[in-house]
């Protein structure tokens, strides 16, 4: 069964945006080329949170992507760059990505916190998603 993965990251300062943008696009290209990638989307919310939504053949394919290449090299930087980070995963019968409102609902209901070195008040309080749902900016298709 396909697995859906959603993430939300919030940068603690705008000075991190240029390198975050570079790593985000490079990770998106890596995902598109990864075995088991079924589709995805990148977006943002009104509070400047960055969202990803990806569909994978299975959990092993998702973890293989996460633990390799530029994505793996980006993850330690996010500890310093982000003051909010959360994720949610679930399996479903097909690889259809959730609509933004459903991704937002799931993140708020089922999301888990990722470690950050400088948590915001919201992160420290366990808030996994902003008040607004994401807006999709870029759709990703497998290569």
Image (tube, rainbow, N blue to C red):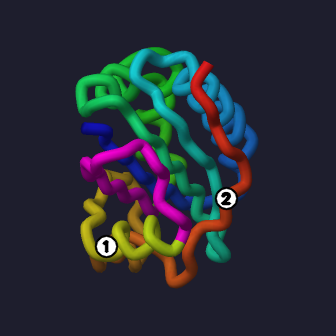
Residue displayed at 32% across by 24% down: 61
Instruction: Estimate the spatial distance between the alpha carbons at disc 1 and disc 2, rounded to whole Å.
Output: 27 Å
Q: Name, please, the residue furthest toward the bottom.
A: 131
**What quarter of the picture does the N terminus occupy?**
top left
- Residues drawn in magenta: 84-100
What residue is drawn where x is 33% and y is 20%? Answer: 64
Magenta stretch holds residue 87: yes
Question: Can residue 11 be seen from the camera position used here?
Answer: no
Q: Where is residue 119 shown, x and y percent of the image?
A: 39, 65
The residue wearing badge 2 is: 136
Place of residue 19 in the rendered image (x, y in percent of width and height, measured from the top left):
68, 36
| Element type at mark 1 | helix
In this view of the protein, which residue sits in the foreground, 142 or 135? Answer: 142
Depth order, front residue of 78/138: 138
- As drawn, the label of residue 124 is 1
Q: Is residue 103 shown left or right of residue 39?
A: left
Residue 70 visible in rendering: yes
For image coordinates 46% across by 49% down, the residue present is 96
User: Which quarter of the figure has residue 113?
Assistant: bottom left
Image vertical order of residue 140 relative to residue 135, above or below: above
Does the magenta segment cover residue 120? no
Q: Secondary structure at mark 2?
A: strand
Report x, y in % for residue 116: 37, 53
């Amino acid at each position: 069964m396909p697995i859906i993965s959603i993430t939300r990251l919030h940068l603690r300062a705008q000075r991190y945006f240029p390198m975050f943008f570079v790593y985000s696009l490079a990770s998106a290209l890596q995902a598109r080329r990864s075995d088991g990638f079924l589709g995805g989307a990148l977006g943002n919310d009104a509070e400047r949170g960055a969202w990803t939504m990806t569909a994978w053949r299975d959990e092993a394919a998702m973890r293989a992507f996460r633990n390799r290449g530029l994505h793996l090299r980006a993850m330690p930087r996010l500890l310093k760059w982000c003051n909010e980070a959360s994720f949610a995963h679930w399996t479903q019968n097909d690889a259809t990505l959730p609509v933004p409102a459903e991704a937002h609902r799931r993140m708020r209901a089922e999301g888990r916190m990722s470690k950050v070195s400088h948590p915001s008040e919201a992160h420290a309080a366990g808030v996994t998603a902003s008040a607004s749902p994401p807006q999709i900016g870029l759709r990703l298709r497998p290569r």
